[in-house]
Amino acid sequence: MLKKLLIALGALICLFLVALAFVFYKAGAIPDKIANPDEALVIHLKPGQTASSVWRMLPISVDKAQSLWFRVFRKMQPEYARVKAGYYEFAPDSTVEEIFTRIIKADETLFSITLVEGLTLNQWLAFIESTVNLHQDLPPFNELYSKLKTGDSNFCENPSASLEGCLLPDTYFYAFNDSALSILKRAFEAMDANLDRIWQERFQDIPIEHPYEALILASIIEKETAVDAERGLIAGVFSNRLELGMRLQTDPTVIYGIIDSGEAFDGNITRTHLREKTRYNTYRIDGLPPTPIAMPSLASLEAAVKPDLTDYLYFVAKGDGSHEFSQTLEEHNQAVSLYQLKRKQNTN
């Protein structure tokens, strides 16, 4: 009798161990399970949601048995319960383990926004406001400067409280629903730090006396050329003109002045525009305009404070993105005639 009881007990123990092994086997297979073999998966986990919430978001068959295996798995791997709120995107064929590993590390999906050099603040703001997945918390235009200025820093202080030119063009990464204002703040602080460094490395005999003037000059250089090899030459031309007391006479400032005055600009600069005395028209005002006219790149900033040593006083666009440089007005007029003629021939 005792022998039969022992055999029965042994059989029960074996069955229990087999069942237990089966449960652990099924639970152990959870991490390798493909969550979604066909398309990308988005999980937006909010504060307070748990590992079970993530499990229910997976596009797999979550029946009672699967839920049992998952509960056992979570007991086996308690760290998988420490999920972090956030926005996560997963590629097709991601496994359950890959999904949970990222979520417990708060390895959120990042987005990017590229703020391009040579554009104006208004163009940047319009682009930011059209960008998805950003929390649109930009204050009114006239409050932007005060929102970005920190402490006693005098970076970018100017009578107009203008932010033009004061933000660093770059690609900025952000998480889902990050603050749009925080992007501008990062760009503001990045320009502050870089301008300080570049100003410390400047040539000591340049005809500008303040870092803000470097921003203004750099913005004009940025608008005049996209050819890296020309930035230093154009900076040299403007430095020579400032040294001699000549007006800069640069078209991009005229265009900015037209827009700043509220006038519509159709892309063509007229004689009337050149004669109009706006605060930005460098054909009519001496020295630099009051603020930058665009967001300058670091390359243009470097050129502004380290201009090429040259005798050039003039340049004209060739029509291919580059420029012809001249030392005398006579040479310049000849170059203007030549390239204007070429443009007319190309349009006929």
Image: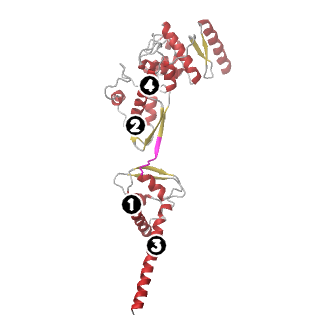
Quarter assignment of residue 314: top right
Q: Which secondary structure, mark 3?
A: helix
Per the model, the C-alpha gap separating discs 2 and 3 is: 52 Å
> Which residue has dot 2 on it?
180
Per the model, the C-alpha gap separating discs 1 and 2 is: 37 Å
Which quarter of the figure is the C terminus placed in? top right
Q: Circles 1 and 2: CB distance less than 8 Å? A: no
Q: Is residue 197 magenta?
A: no
Task: Report x, y in % for residue 32.
Answer: 50, 61
Q: Circles 4 and 1: CB distance less than 8 Å? A: no
Residue plotted at (47% across, 68% down): 26
> Which residue has dot 4 on it?
197
Name the N-terminal-most of marks 3 and 4.
3
> Which residue has dot 3 on it?
21
Residues in magenta?
105-111
Task: Report x, y in % for residue 91.
Answer: 52, 52
Q: Which secondary structure, mark 4?
A: helix
> Which residue has dot 1 on it?
78
Rendered position, 46 above or below 151: below
Name the N-terminal-most of marks 2 and 3.
3
For badge 4, the amino acid type reads Arg
Prevailing SS of the magenta stretch: loop
Q: Nearer the viewer, mark 1 or mark 2?
A: 1
